[in-house]
């Protein structure tokens, strides 16, 4: 009787021959905050940022949001350092970089022009920045060709509507110089670049013209290397390629002069793709 009572009192007890009842699983304790943080991105190494880069970022933000506009002055160096809680050398370095980019103009002294003024970024400064980025980007030739085709098709179509006499005169002068019998490859390449930039500028879209200039100038040396590598004779020799480029340029200009936008765009694309096939880059 005692054994029976004991078994009844103990819910874990089993009768002889019966299968044991498994104990309920014990839940694992939740990970601590520290453990979950260690397994996440929370403790990845911090990016080291120089103080002048923070100053640059703050000034650029003010320009982008419209708080600083072309022609407005920045606070004096000492005041700007105090406002931002940084050293004067950090401010000076940031301003030096902005000046090299053509974003600001700094003038020492106490006259009306003294201080640091936000500039309206000139086209040559923007083109210079883009040119360096394109040159360092190691972009595949196919990417450069596709970008040139897209840009120059659009700009030549605009030029068919907007080109002024001075634009046409500049392009004619470039072609006349390229037609010189003894023109050398380097001079031809310079005139070729000038023609394409003039064509983009004739479209009246400054951004397209600046990007076109940047791409063309970044490709100046690779194009010259390809021209220099051409043999002196033969179907793929320098005289043959030169004459083909001359004919292309004249055909493009003729389409612009008559306002034939689709024809001009098609000729520009064919011209760019055909020469790209001869580039040794």
Image: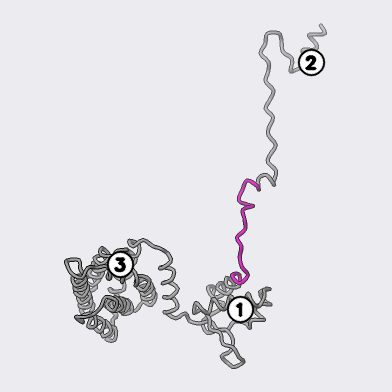
Taking the image as shown, residue 97 lies to the left or right of residue 203, namely right
Earlier-in-chain disc, 2 versus 1: 2
Whether 43 is among the magenta residues is yes
Identify the magenta region. Answer: 37-54
Quadrant containing the N terminus is top right
Q: Where is residue 109 drawn, in percent x and y?
A: 60, 91
Which of disc 3 and disc 1 is earlier in sequence?
1
Q: Nearer the viewer, mark 1 or mark 3?
A: 1
Between 68 and 132, the one nearer to me in the picture: 132
Q: Nearer the viewer, residue 248 or 186?
A: 186
Give whichever of 128, 160 is nearer the camera. 128
Residue 9: mark: 2
- Asked whether the beta carbons under mark 3 and mark 2 sit within 8 Å of each other, the answer is no
The residue at 68%/25% (across/down) is 24
Name the spot of residue 213 as percent of width and height, x first: 36, 75
Q: Quadrant of residue 162?
A: bottom left
**Does the magenta portion include 118?**
no
Lower sequence index among marks 3 and 2? 2
- Measured along the vertical axis of the image, is residue 51 above or below residue 184? above
Residue at the spot of label 1: 92
Q: Choose between 4 and 168: the one closer to the eye.
A: 168
Q: Residues within 10 Å of mark 3 (few under 14, many from 20)?
A: many
What residue is shown at x 57% (from left), y 77% (from top)?
Answer: 67
Tell me the residue that label 3 is attached to: 149
């Amino acid at each position: 009787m005692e054994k029976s009572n004991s078994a009844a009192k103990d819910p874990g007890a089993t009768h002889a021959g019966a299968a044991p009842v498994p104990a309920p699983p014990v839940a694992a304790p939740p990970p601590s905050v520290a453990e979950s943080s260690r397994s996440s991105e929370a403790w990845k190494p911090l990016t080291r940022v120089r103080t002048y880069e923070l100053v640059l970022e703050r000034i650029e933000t003010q320009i982008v949001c419209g708080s600083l506009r072309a022609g407005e002055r920045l606070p004096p160096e000492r005041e700007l350092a105090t406002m931002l809680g940084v050293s004067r050398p950090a401010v000076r370095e940031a301003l030096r970089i902005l000046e090299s980019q053509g974003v600001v103009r700094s003038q020492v002294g106490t006259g009306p022009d003294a201080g640091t003024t936000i500039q309206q970024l000139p086209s040559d400064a923007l083109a210079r920045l883009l040119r360096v980025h394109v040159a360092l980007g190691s972009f595949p030739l196919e990417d450069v060709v596709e970008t040139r085709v897209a840009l120059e098709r659009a700009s030549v179509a605009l030029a068919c509507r907007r080109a002024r006499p001075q634009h046409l005169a500049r392009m004619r002068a470039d072609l006349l110089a390229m037609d010189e019998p003894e023109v050398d490859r380097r001079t031809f390449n310079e005139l070729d670049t000038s023609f394409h930039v003039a064509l983009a500028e004739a479209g009246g879209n400054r951004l397209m013209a600046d990007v076109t200039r940047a791409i063309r100038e970044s490709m100046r040396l690779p194009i010259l290397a390809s021209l220099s590598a051409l043999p002196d004779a033969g179907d793929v020799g320098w005289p043959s390629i030169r004459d083909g480029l001359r004919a292309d340029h004249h055909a493009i200009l003729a389409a612009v002069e008559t306002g034939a936008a689709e024809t001009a765009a098609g000729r520009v694309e064919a011209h760019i793709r055909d020469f790209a096939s001869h580039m040794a880059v």
